Amino acid sequence: MKCTKYEALFTFADEKTFTEHLKTCPDCQAEHAKMEKVSELIQEVRPHFLKRKKTAAKLKIACAVFAMCLSATTLGIINLNTDISDTIKYGTTLTAEDLGLPVDSYGFILVE
Ligand SMILES: [Zn+2]
């Protein structure tokens, strides 16, 4: 019959009881070897995982910077090109409200 004490001993028993049982029980030895393999695997995988998380954070920052640059460029074009600016301010087709931006009663974009 296969020994099923491994998990219980691993979780609740003290180190001495656990290792004593390991010495005498081949079933738990096999179980322990499996556990060590798993923890080895975790140790191996973890640095990769952390690296991936860092890359994701960098990507987020890059996206934010890109979005900021894009909006800055767009605003720059609007400021330089009065035609476009007038079209957006007074045009009948495109208002700030149409663009889904928060506007006050005058139709100006709300800036907090
Ligand atoms: Zn056992």
Image (cartoon, rainbow, N blue to C red):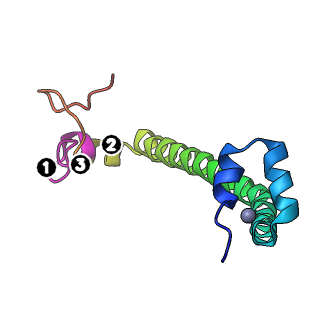
Give the percent coordinates (x, y) of residue 74. 45, 47
Q: Secondary structure at mark 2?
A: helix
Q: CA distance from mark 3 to mark 1?
A: 12 Å
Pick out the residue farthest to the right. 23
Marks 3 and 1, the one that precedes in the sequence: 1
- Cβ–Cβ under 8 Å for marks 2 and 1: no
Report the magenta stretch's main SS.
loop
Residue 99: image tag: 3
* For residue 80, above or below residue 7: above
Q: Which residue is mark 2?
A: 85
Provide the residue span drawn in magenta. 88-99
Give the percent coordinates (x, y) of residue 90. 19, 41
Marks 3 and 2, the one that precedes in the sequence: 2
Classify 10 Å Cα crowding around label 1: few (below 14), some (14-19), many (20 and above). few
Q: Is residue 75 visible?
A: yes
**Residue 109 falls in which quadrant of the image?**
top left
The residue that appears at 13% across and 49% down in the rendered structure is 92
Please name the amino acid that badge 2 sits on: Ser
Foreground mark, 3 or 2?
3
Label 3 lies in ligand 1 vicinity (Cβ under 8 Å): no
Marks 2 and 1, the one that precedes in the sequence: 2
Q: Secondary structure at mark 1?
A: loop
Q: Is residue 54 visible?
A: no
Asked if residue 89 lies in the magenta stretch, the reply is yes
Give the percent coordinates (x, y) of residue 110. 26, 28
Total number of numbered discs in the rendering: 3
Relative to the observer, which residue lies in front, 63 or 74?
Answer: 63
Ligand 1, image quadrant it occupies = bottom right
Please name the amino acid that badge 3 sits on: Leu
Q: Which residue is mark 1?
A: 92
Relative to the observer, which residue lies in front, 59 or 37?
Answer: 37
- Cβ–Cβ under 8 Å for marks 3 and 1: no
